[in-house]
Image (spheres, coloured by chain):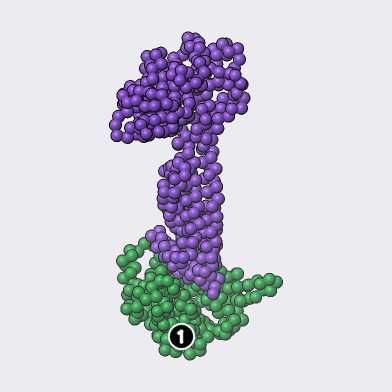
Chain colours: A purple, B green
Amino acid sequence: MDLRDSFRNATRAIWAAKMRSFLTMLGIIIGIAAVVMLMAVGNGTKQSILSRMQSSGSGNLYLTAGARSNVLMGGNPEGGAGGFAASRAGVSSGAEITAQDLTYIEARVTYSVVVSPTNQTNITIKNGNTTMSGTGIFATPTYFQVENVTIADGRMISDGDVSNRTRNVVIGNTVQTTLFPNESAVGQLIRINGASYKVVGVAASKGETVGSSVDTAIVLPFSVGEKSFGIAHNRVQRTTIECVDPTQTKVVIAEITDILTLKHKKVDFTIQDVAAMTALVTSSMTILTTLLAAIGGLSLLVGGIGIMNIMLVSVTERTREIGIRKALGARERDILVQFLIESSLLSISGGILGIVVSVLGSDFVVSRFTTTAVTGSSILLAVGFSIAVGVFFGVYPARTAARLKPVEALRYE
Amino acid sequence: MSLIAFSDIRKVYTIGAVTIDALAGVSFDIGEHEFVAIMGPSGSGKSTLMHILGCLDAPTSGAYRLEDYDVSQLRSNDLARIRNRDIGFVFQAYNLLPHLSALENVLLPCTYSTHAVSGRDEKARALELLERIGLKDRMYNRPVEMSGGEQQRVAIARALMMNPPVILADEPTGNLNSKGAREILDIMKELHADGKTIVYVTHDDTIGAEAERVIRIQDGRVVADERN
């Protein structure tokens, strides 16, 4: 029996029991949709976390005050973005990093690094009657380099701005569109916490990054922080150290740890490695995605059992047909293939419908709540899985059919 | 040489502790182009005999030769090929597939044929057979849309599809009225005249009387083998 005949027979048999076939397929539809959608959530979350982390540069190290038992799990001290709970456990009180510490490090480090000290505080920004809240980032010109922030309009904070405590600021893209919807903000005056500042530049949009988004932030000269925003003198909350050669992060961490330990006489600070954090996130999110897929897989398993059940019913109902076909010369293989094609067709159609459901579902429904990414590999996996389910759960009923004795099958009423 | 040779065929069914000898050593030869009626009361073992003859069931012991094949030694794939090519079945209950049209039912054996014949040739032959049994205009009808006699004629066309040398008919007129039965019997006689070997199982003496030879079975044994 050639395959075309087999497929025609199978579609016919499926079509002959439309309702039953659809209900059977529904199990696979739900199973595949669950697998694909849950994987989409897992992959989407992973991608969004990774893109936030990578947007700040792979060779970046973060130096913060306070020792932590686990450097990798320490997270980001500014409040934990994207699933990174900033554990404050183990922060020794009173520890701090000062501008002198950084000067000390820069004078002694032997590798090529760029040091960018920052402080942050929440601020209120006002232009005319429009007010918004945002983050004030007090930084030096190196901030723009290490955080990959580019200037869309105007200029960045200059060394002169920092040394003269000039009230010049660079605003984020969202700040620009909120406060100056119809004109360029460059050269305009805005009010921050009541005082007047001059916009000298607008940063290009970057989306959300680790810590906070530059889009809703205002970058002010580092020195302005302690003058007008009550930040302790010389205090540095977070320092980003960019290794010019990203492969050297480990040795740079070791060297800076040695240098600073020498000065502080103890390890009361933490240096975090973005690349190591990225690797950790990648592996833990992969585990999460696999786990989610496995949960979806359970419903697929139930769908597969549904197929097996209905195929067993079908074999019993069609015992006489099997007998007739055997009397006309059908071999065991012919009967086996006929029923296997039928069960596979059920599960493949269910799988395809399930993919359609999951793509629509994750684009229009789930994406409202969380980031989703339906990847080609998850679709391939789903298709492969649905074929496998059809064959696996079809084998037993098909073998039952194929092994029926012709004379007994013919006698069946 | 004979076409069919049965020697000491036995079939024993074991149900629990009870064994039933459905066939208790049956031997006979059937030559080419014979028209043989196998007769006997119900429970005599003639159905079992028919199933073994048609390679639908295997004997418990004994030797069965069909043409050049030692059937008792063949495996299931070879038996399937024999059922496909060498034997045409006509059943009492017609056994057409209900969801297929008359034409598709006639074409069904081709789907299990191992040698390639073009689809166009197959269809031409099926139409020729339907025309021969007078049902060409009903070729797109399904079995439920036909009378019993018509269904049985379609079944005969299906049996002839692969042009087998032997036609095995198991009470083919059992479910038909006398007019329908007459038509079927006439077709059988015509096929015999064309050179087919016909083995016809029945308990109807009037039909037996029209066969060349009658083998009578009782209690799993041949009790009479006579030529008319």
Location of residue B205 with respect to A222 vertically, above or below: below
Q: Identify the residue at horizontal 47%, vertical 62% (top origin).
A: A21
Q: Identify the residue at horizontal 42%, vertical 26% (top origin).
A: A194
Viewer-proximal residue among B193 and A9: A9
Location of residue A301 with respect to B137 vertically, above or below: above
Residue at the right extreme of this rendering:
B17
Location of residue B163 with respect to A123 vertically, above or below: below
Q: Identify the residue at horizontal 54%, vertical 63% (top origin).
A: A312
Q: Position of residue B173 (x, y in %)?
A: 46, 84
Q: Mark 1 falls on what kind of element?
A: loop
What is the tally of numbered marks visible in this picture?
Answer: 1
Q: Mark 1 falls within which chain?
A: B
Residue at the top extreme of this rendering:
A107
Q: Is residue B10 something that shows in the picture? A: yes
How many neighbours does mark 1 have within 10 angstroms: few (below 14), some (14-19), or many (20 or more)?
some
Q: Which residue is denoted by mark 1 in the rendering?
A: B176
Q: Is residue A248 something that shows in the picture? A: no
Which quarter of the picture shows residue B167?
Answer: bottom left
Q: Where is residue A338 in the image (x, y as percent from the top left)?
A: 46, 61
Q: Position of residue A336 (x, y in %)?
A: 49, 60
The reply, left or right, for residue A289 in relation to residue A143 is: right
Viewer-proximal residue among A350 and A167: A167
Q: What residue type is labelled 1?
A: Leu
The reply, left or right, for residue B120 in relation to residue A27 is: left
Q: Identify the residue at horizontal 45%, vertical 41% (top origin).
A: A371
Q: Position of residue A48 (x, y in %)?
A: 45, 36
Viewer-proximal residue among A275 and A404: A275
Which quarter of the picture shows residue B220?
Answer: bottom right
The reply, left or right, for residue A310 in relation to residue A114 is: right
